[in-house]
Image (cartoon, grey):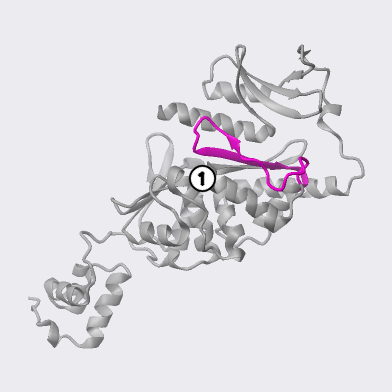
């Protein structure tokens, strides 16, 4: 039978050990069994040390200090969770849902944080990883400005070291962005407008991007949700961003299909850079389907139409338009109404997904 000791009879080394291990995630019962003392003795040691007792210690173990320091791994996964995770402070839980095809990426996260739990397969075809305990919600809020209801509250981490920017932003891209190569490379981000505006400034100041518009910063485009915006780059600017994000990225700090898209595009990016003549998209396009009274040329784009129909946007038609000034836009129409538009092909797909998400939440 375990004995209940007076706290003063416990050596200072044992008291320090109890406090340290409890802060690292061990439970009071676990420590009591390990030290062969009564659980109430462990609790009194913690009370005397002014350590708040948890209501429940998670059964699954993990590195509770993972997000307490700025490393390539912690910054990447903080960015990924900001884009595609959920922080529930009141329930002391961090959770992330991914499509089942990306299950291996959740396994990478488990490996990084040394998580002993399991991934849950959901009925809707997704998979979910839930990490219980107050350590991560508090640490992510303190160091990475990741708050509950992140769309409305999150901002770019103000204390993030500059050398960690590319890891954090790569996490954002892998979580809620896209990499595409059609006639030219493109990279698109979607998220809170605070984050998108911060990225626009960060890219221009760090990578010295040159915009065709002559503006200092790329514009953040609106979506149907006033709090969410999109940010897109193409051509040489996209190449510079992708090289910066993915070159020499540490293992377990990239999503395979996003990195594979970059690796697929990379030799084509360099071949285009070394080419004296870069073919324009309109030189390989057939004659426009029609030209309206304002002189705007319209080409139908079946891939956009199919993409929208797969997402059950009825009677939607995709178009590429060109103004008399030469400005190009990609447009989704529904009857006589312009439903969505964007200067980037891939960015329009992002907007379509945001539109569907907004409709789902209504």
Q: Quadrant of the N terminus?
A: bottom left
Relative to 168, residue 238 above or below = above
* Drawn side of residue 229 relative to residue 205, left or right: left
Task: State whether residue 215 appears in this view.
Answer: yes
> In this rendering, is residue 50 above or below 242?
below
Q: Among all residues in the image, which is located at the extreme front?
A: 215
Q: Residues within 10 Å of mark 1 (few under 14, many from 20)?
A: some
Quadrant in the rendering for residue 232: top right
| Residue 328 left/right relative to 1 | right
Which stretch appears magenta? 211-236
Of 319 and 270, which appears nearest the observer?
319
Q: Decide: is 267 above or below 157.
A: above
Q: Position of residue 153 (x, y in %)?
A: 43, 47
Closer to the camera in the image, 111 or 140: 140
Q: Position of residue 34 (x, y in %)?
A: 22, 75
Q: Visible in this render: residue 116?
A: no
Q: Residue 312 in magenta? A: no
Name the residue located 57 percent from the left edge and 45 percent from the top edge. Answer: 196
Please give the name of the residue rendered at 64% of the width and 48% of the height, measured from the top-left corner. 200
Give how far across and how far down residue 120 sits, in percent: 37, 46
């Amino acid at each position: 039978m375990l004995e209940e000791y007076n706290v003063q009879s416990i050596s200072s080394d044992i008291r320090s050990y109890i406090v340290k291990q409890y802060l690292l995630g061990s439970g009071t019962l676990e420590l009591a069994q390990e030290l062969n003392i009564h659980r109430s003795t462990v609790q009194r040691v913690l009370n005397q040390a002014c350590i708040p007792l948890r209501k429940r210690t998670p059964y699954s173990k993990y590195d509770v200090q993972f997000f307490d320091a700025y490393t390539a791994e912690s910054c990447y996964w903080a960015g990924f969770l900001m884009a595609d995770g959920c922080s529930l402070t009141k329930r002391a839980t961090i959770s992330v849902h991914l499509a089942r095809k990306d299950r291996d990426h959740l396994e990478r996260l488990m490996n990084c944080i040394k998580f002993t739990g399991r991934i849950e397969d959901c009925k809707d075809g997704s998979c979910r990883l839930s990490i219980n305990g107050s350590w991560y919600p508090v640490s992510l809020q303190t160091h990475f400005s990741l708050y509950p209801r992140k769309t409305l509250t999150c901002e770019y981490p103000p204390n993030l070291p500059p050398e960690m920017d590319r890891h954090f932003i790569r996490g954002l891209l892998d979580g809620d962005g896209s990499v595409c190569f059609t006639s030219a490379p493109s990279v698109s981000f979607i998220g809170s407008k605070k984050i998108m505006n911060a990225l626009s400034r960060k890219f221009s100041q760090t990578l010295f991007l040159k915009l065709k518009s002559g503006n200092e910063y790329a514009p953040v485009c609106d979506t149907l949700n006033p709090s969410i915006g999109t940010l897109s780059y193409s051509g040489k600017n996209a190449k510079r961003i992708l090289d910066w994000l993915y070159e020499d990225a540490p293992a377990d700090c990239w999503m395979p299909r996003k990195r594979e898209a970059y690796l697929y595009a990379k030799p084509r990016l360099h071949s285009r850079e070394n080419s004296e003549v870069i073919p324009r998209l309109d030189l390989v396009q057939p004659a426009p389907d029609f030209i309206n009274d304002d002189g705007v040329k319209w080409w139908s784009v079946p891939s956009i139409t199919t993409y929208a129909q797969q997402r059950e946007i009825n009677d939607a038609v995709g178009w590429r338009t060109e103004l008399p000034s030469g400005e190009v836009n990609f447009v989704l129409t529904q009857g006589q109404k312009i439903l969505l538009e964007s200067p980037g092909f891939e960015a329009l797909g992002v907007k379509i997904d945001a539109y569907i998400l907004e409709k789902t939440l209504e």
